[in-house]
Image: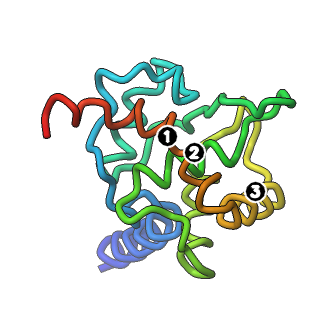
Amino acid sequence: MQFFVLVLVGSLHEAKRLHQNNYTSFFPFNRSNLNGINLSDLGFSESDLENLNLLLNGFEPTSKIDFRLVSDNRIAADYKKLFRILHLLIEGGIKDFKKERKEILFKFIESSFTLNGSEVNRASLNSRFSEFVNESETEFSENLKVFQKILFSWKVFFP
């Protein structure tokens, strides 16, 4: 009987931990892998390919993925570039995310990524997301183009 109680308590604790930490399954992705893509163009290293593919299939990566694309005038990773990539990869995009979905997105990013070797800064994440969603339609479209070409160039050959 005691063994059964221990197993039950352990199972409940593990289920709660997984529910709190596994934000990867909250988002359906437009791609199931990034094979064949030059990952450095997206700000990732080839060593992150396995973890990126796990993420795109709703599994938790074995380690955080380091996003390295920097902004034009800084050495820190560019949060808005990561948002653009995620906007294209997540079905329906992320631009229209409001309070609850945005919070899940932020927890997903915090649990899955580092930015140029540093942990995600929640204040920067919040302010950069606000800048991202408030871009003009023209600016938004132009900023997505480079990542659309990288992520979806295969559609030209396979409609």
Query: In the displayed structure, would residue 138 be above or below residue 146?
Result: below
User: What residue did someone put label 2 on?
Assistant: 142
Disc 2 to disc 3, C-alpha distance = 17 Å
* Residue located 55% across and 35% down the image: 65
Q: Is residue 58 left or right of residue 95?
A: left
* Residue located 65% across and 65% down the image: 133
- Mark 1: secondary structure: helix
Of the residues shown, which amino acid type is indicated by label 3? Arg
Of the pair 16 and 154, the residue shown nearer to us? 154
- Rendered image quadrant of residue 72: top right
User: What residue did someone put label 3 on?
Assistant: 128
Residue at the front extreme, as displayed? 138
* Residue located 38% across and 35% down the image: 151
Of the pair 133 and 31, the residue shown nearer to us? 133
Of the residues shown, which amino acid type is indicated by label 2? Glu
Of the residues shown, which amino acid type is indicated by label 1? Lys
Where residue 81 is drawn, which disc sits there? none
First of labels 2, 3 by sequence position = 3
Of the pair 108 and 18, the residue shown nearer to us? 108
Residue 14: x and y, percent? Answer: 43, 65
Q: Is residue 100 left or right of residue 88?
A: right
Residue 48: x and y, percent? Answer: 47, 26
Query: In the displayed structure, would residue 151 be above or below residue 35?
Result: below
Marks 1/2 in contact by CB < 8 Å: the verdict is: yes
Residue 31: x and y, percent? Answer: 29, 45
User: What residue did someone put label 1 on?
Assistant: 145
Nearer the camera: disc 3 or disc 1: 1
Colouring rule applied to residues: rainbow
